[in-house]
Amino acid sequence: MQYIKLFGILVLVTMLLMPYNAHAATPYETLAKGGAGGWLNVTRPPTEGDMKGRLLLLDFWTYGCVNCMQVVPDLSFLEEKYGDKLLVIGIHSAKYQGEQDSARILSAAKRFGLHHPVINDYDYAIWKSFGVNAWPTLILIGPDGQEISRYSGEGHRNDLDNDIAKNLSGVTNKTSIAALVEKEKQDTVLSFPARIEPFENGFAIADAGHNRILLTSRDGEIEMQIGSGEKGFKDGDYKDAKFNNPRGLKVVGNMIYVADTDNHRLRLIDLKDRKVRTVAGTGKRGYDRSVSNESALSVSLASPWDLEILPNSDSKKLVIASAGLHQLHVYDIPSGRILVLAGSGIENIKDGEAAKAQLAQPSGLTTDGSAIYFVDAESSALRELKDGQVKTLIGTGLFNYGLKDGTYPTAMLQHPQGLDYANGKIYVADTYNSALRVYDLKTGELSTLKWTGDPLGEVGDINIEGDMAYIVDTTHHKIEKLDVTNGKTEAVTITLPTAK
C-alpha cells in the first residue's frame, strides 16, 4: 500500500523474520522502560501498574508522516469513547535524524493535539521488539498482556473499535489515567504558524495551532482575526468560522483561499462579504486517486497542504498540494471543479509524464510564471512540473536526506515543507535541517543561506520580497526577517492592535 512508509529493504526483511515474542520481557516491562529517549507528554513516567489490566493501543509513528497525522482523529475518537479502559501509547520511532530530538517530538505531540503518553524510541528498540515494519502501525494489547490485533496504515478505526469492544470484559484496572498526560502550556501570540503570504500592505498568516488566519500590518500588528480559534469546522462570519490546522494560503483578488489541512477541505475567505465558506472537499479523508473534472464539493481531499496559482490560468485555477494522496490537484475557480494535475498516487520519487509520476507528500508550492515548483517532504526533494512533465531537481529517494550543498544528485535536503521563487532562484524552507536553502535554476546549484540570528527551529515557510525573506519558524512560534544579501536577521513581533 502506497501510504505505508517502509523502513528499507534490509531492515524490513529483518523485522519480518522477527516474531512478535522475540523479546523475553512482557509488553509492560518493555514499555515501562520508556525507550532510549524516555517518556514525553506526561506528568510522570507510566508504570507497569498503569498498563496492566486495561487495553493498550500502541501507535508506532514518526511525526513527519502525513499518514501518521491522519490517524490522530481515530486515536482521539477511541480515547474519548473508552476512557480509562483504554490507554493509548504513542511510540515515536523516527524516520529522519531531525525527528529524533525529544523536544521536537514533544512539540509535534502538542501540535497534533495528542492526549496520551509518548515514548521516544529513536534507536528502534521497541519497534524491533514488536516486529513493526511500517508507519503507522497500531497494535492492540489485551488486559492480559497478549496481542489482540495489529494494523498498518490508515482507515482502521472501525476495526479497532470492534476489537476493543469485544475485549472490554477483561478490563480490571479502573484507575484514572487522565492525570498522566501533560497539559498544554502554550501562551504565545502565534501557535505553530505554518504559512505566510503577502496581503495588501502586510501579511496573511496561517496560525495553525490557534486554528485561525491572521491579517497583519507590515510591522506585525494584527489587524484582523479570521476564525474563532476553536478547532473544528464551520462556515460563516469571521468570528464564528472554525478551522482545523490550516496551512496553505493564496490571495486571489479579494479572496484568500485556505488549505484547511485537518478538515480535508479547501476554504474561501471572502474579504468583501467577510464570510468563510467551503469550496472543495467533503470533510472526509479521501482515498480516490483518479479524480477527473468532478464537482469539488463532492470530492474527498486528503490533507491539502499548500496552494499556488496555476501558470497561464489568469488566476482562475489553483494548484493544491494534496499531501495525503501524494498528488497535485487543480481547482478551477469559475466552475468549482477539480482534477488531478500530477501524481499517480504511488508514494515514491519518479519523474516523467505528470499522470504517471510518483510524488511523496507534496507540502509546498511556488511558481515562476511558467512552471510549478514543489517540495516533496517524504523524499526530501525539490521538483518541477512543466509542460506536463515532472522533473526532480534535488532528491534521490524516500530514505535519502541530509544537509549538503552542491548539485543533483549530491545535494541534499531534509523533509522540506515550504518554498518561494524570486529572481531565477527557489528559496526553500528546509524544515528538518532548520535551515534556509537556495536553488539556482540556471546552474542547478543548491546552497545554504547565511543566518546570524538565534538558531532556527523547524521552518515551515519562506516568502521573498526584494532582498528580504520572511521566515515562518513553526516550532518557535514566530516570524523572522532575513536580509538574504548579508544574513542579518530581525524578529517580526506579532502584536495585538494598539488601542486607539
Image (cartoon, grey):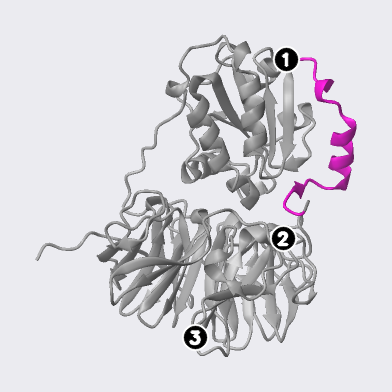
| Residue type at the position of mark 1 | Thr
Q: Nearer the viewer, residue 129 or 86?
A: 86
Picture coordinates of residue 7, whole percent (x, y): 79, 45
Picture coordinates of residue 127, whole percent (x, y): 73, 32
> Left or right: 124 with respect to 267?
right
Query: What segment carries the magenta color?
Result: 2-26
Please, what secondary structure does the residue beneath circle 2 have? helix
N-term mark: 2 or 1 = 1
> Left or right: 257 with respect to 397?
left
Judged by depth in the image, the label closer to the viewer, 1 or 3, is: 3
On residue 379, which mark appears?
A: 2
Task: Give neighbour class at mark 2: few <14, some 14-19, many 20+ (Cα, 10 Å).
Answer: many
Residue 359 seen in the current view: yes
On residue 373, which mark appears?
A: none
N-term mark: 1 or 3 = 1
Q: Classify the position of the C terminus by image quarter.
A: bottom left
Residue at numbered disc 1: 26
> Left or right: 250 with respect to 127?
left
Q: Nearer the viewer, residue 283 or 87?
A: 283
| Residue type at the position of mark 2 | Ser
Which residue is drawn at the image coordinates 44% and 60% (left, top)?
A: 453
Picture coordinates of residue 235, whole percent (x, y): 36, 60
On residue 315, which mark appears?
A: 3
